[in-house]
Amino acid sequence: MHSAGRRRRSQAELLPAATRVMWVLIVAAALLTLGFTFYPEWSRLADMKRDLSAQQSKLAELKTQCSDRELEVKLLQTDREYLEIIARDRLDLMKEGETIFRLSSAQHKS
């Protein structure tokens, strides 16, 4: 009788332990499934955020360049002195009786 009671007790203790192990396995399988499902999307989202940041930096740089160009166009259209300076510099124009000296900034090799 003593061994029968022990057997019943160990079987009775085994069932809740097996149930806990089964729940742990189910939860682990669910977490693994979620991880494998969503990890590529999280990774893709991080890549997209990095790309967005790089594009925003490039956009800010282009906006700065655009405003610089707009200012240059405005100066070329309205400021006669600026237009004269640009024409003389870029087109090698000079006023009558004026001599232009160009100094090269290249270093000579010894």
Image: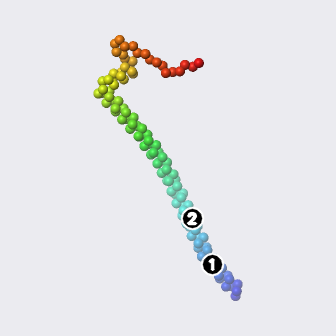
Tell me where residue 22 appears, x and y as whole percent.
Answer: 59, 70
Q: Residue 73 occupies which quadrant of the picture? A: top left
Tag 2: Cα neighbours inside 10 Å, few (<14), some, or many (≥20)? few
Towards the viewer: 51 or 104: 104
Tell me where residue 102 appears, x and y as whole percent.
Answer: 44, 17
Q: Where does label 2 land, which residue? A: 28
- Residue furthest to the top: 97
Q: Residue 110 occupies which quadrant of the picture? A: top right
Towards the viewer: 100 or 2: 100
83 left or right of 36? left
x 39%, y 21%: residue: 89
15 left or right of 80? right
Tell me the element at label 2: helix
Marks 2 and 1, how far apart in space?
A: 23 Å
Which badge, 2 or 1, is on the more N-terminal residue? 1
Q: What amino acid does circle 2 point to?
A: Ala
Tell me where residue 88 appears, x and y as whole percent.
Answer: 37, 20
Tag 1: Cα neighbours inside 10 Å, few (<14), some, or many (≥20)? few
x 52%, y 55%: residue: 39
Q: Where does label 1 land, which residue? A: 13
- Residue furthest to the bottom: 1
- Colouring style: rainbow
Check the image and report above or below for 59 versus 5: above
x 48%, y 19%: residue: 104
x 51%, y 51%: residue: 43
Tell me the element at label 1: helix
Towards the viewer: 6 or 75: 75
Quadrant (top left, top right, bottom left, bottom right) of the N terminus:
bottom right
15 left or right of 61? right
Check the image and report above or below for 16 versus 27: below
Q: What amino acid does circle 1 point to?
A: Glu
